Image (spheres, grey):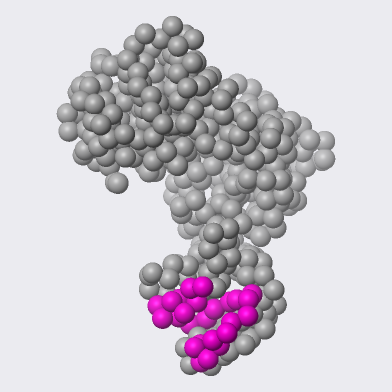
Amino acid sequence: MADWKFNAKELADIIDGTVLVDHGEVVSGLGTDTRSDLSDQLFIALKGEVHDAHHFLQQAVEQGAKGVIIHSELSQMDFFQDKAFVIKVHDTLRALQDLALWWRRHCGWKVLGVTGSSGKTTTKELTKKILEQKLKVHANEKNFNNHWGVPFNLLGAPKHVDAVIVEMGMNHLGEIKRLCEIAEPTSVVCTMVGTAHIGELGSKENIAKAKEEIYLNAPNATKVFNIDNEQTIEMHLRAVERGEKSIITFSSFRADADIQLRAVEMTLDSLQIVGSILGVSGEVSLGVMGRHNIANIGAAVGLALSISFTPQDVWEYLNHLKLSAWGRNQLVHLKNGSQIIFDAYNANPESMAALIKNIFELSFRGKKMAVFGEMLELGEASARSHYAIGEMVGNADIDVVWFIGEHKGDFERGLKATGFSKTYFISDTYEETLALKFGSMIQPSDVVVLKGSRGIKLERVLNAWEPVDFNK
């Protein structure tokens, strides 16, 4: 919980606002949900594409808010007398961002910025696990990675923490630039560039351009680079050409990288890696699944080094580190003992391909089964991307497959192009009868993968099977 407190005048000075109503109230903390207790909190009337929080001001005050920030005229100003102060600004979103920047500067934390087409959240969680072994760390919860979420994250960070980790997402060019202006990161990394958000940006080149903003708009930050990904390799070369001095590189293949990590053994719930960190060799076992996570581990190690962790520290803290984030390579069990990999928080072609490759290269006594949900936000690339995933699944020796989504036809054509002759189901949307039929086929020695975009809500499939250790 943040420990900031403001009266109306202090707050108005920070956000360049005009105090309209004030009876000496003091606010502490930022309230956003008018259905919950907002006692003594500040409520900012943000306007989104669907909802305008100006319509919920009275509810916010009735729930205990002691201050509100508005940018529209209010017809019932008398309501706020003796209840809450009112400050008017030109733009409430800008006010939120300016307040977050003020708090960030006032506290003076190390701020670690993370972006990338895949791996942002895993890198954030890995970094937090490493850093909190010796530091007080705050990191964003939920999906707080956009022009609203980053300010919420910063304003939720206590003054006394040492480091704040900030995910930076984007849908358009210029968005990460603005997030850097708000967060002023002291260390930054782009995990990799893939085709997530290609529907909005139109090309992989534009995605790379948008992601590179994290390096171009953090002039004094230590920059951590993945030198195994084509686009981030180019970003690294441009940084060197600009004369950047504070650079850390990571790789699974290159001997010239500062961080060299390689997977030597993998199970459904662990990854054994060997390598070298700034010349210090090591070997550790982590509670993380999938070779694709090597890049995320490398990024997290780079961020730790950027704030003066030693290689010896990092090797020690990596050993037996375990991740258990909802919907991200989450190992779940059914009553009959079968194992489910639930990875349905997000999906794009690169993460989908990585999961298929990583899981099904393992040997199992039972069947290999999979439920795939559509990959959203791919725009014109959707048809060919789902066809390609269908081909990959057809070549992966999977015994039973179910695809859910509007692009089921593209997936099916790719699947059939490989000569796939095993059992498969396709549907536009979730169907409980299919979920139960699929579930009846799962035997104790089988392994099942669920992977898809968050909007497909694949947890409905898993819940139909009545897992014993899944937080719905």
For residue 267, which quarter of the picture? top left
Report the residue at 37% width, 8% height from top: 421
**Magenta span contains residue 455:** no
Report the residue at 45% width, 42% height from top: 455
Instruction: Looking at this view, name the residue that lies furthest to the right.
Output: 242
Image position of 29 with respect to 293: above or below: below
For residue 7, which quarter of the picture? bottom right
**Magenta span contains residue 57:** yes
Closer to the camera, 244 or 147? Answer: 147
Closer to the camera, 101 or 377? Answer: 377
Residue 296 seen: no
Where does the image place residue 381, in percent across and percent down from the top left?
61, 28
Closer to the camera, 46 or 472? Answer: 46
Image position of 40 with respect to 223: above or below: below
| Badge count | 0
Q: Which residues are magenta?
A: 55-81
Instruction: Looking at this view, name the residue that lies furthest to the left.
Output: 336
Residue 172 seen: yes
Image position of 170 with respect to 150: above or below: above
Image position of 410 with respect to 122: above or below: above
Report the residue at 68% width, 39% height from top: 201
Instruction: Looking at this view, name the residue that lies furthest to the top.
Output: 419
Where does the image place residue 427, in percent across and percent down from the top left?
38, 28
Report the residue at 25% width, 31% height from top: 433
Where does the image place residue 154, in percent across and percent down from the top left?
56, 62
Q: Quadrant of the N terminus?
A: bottom left
Where does the image place residue 26, in percent across and percent down from the top left?
51, 84
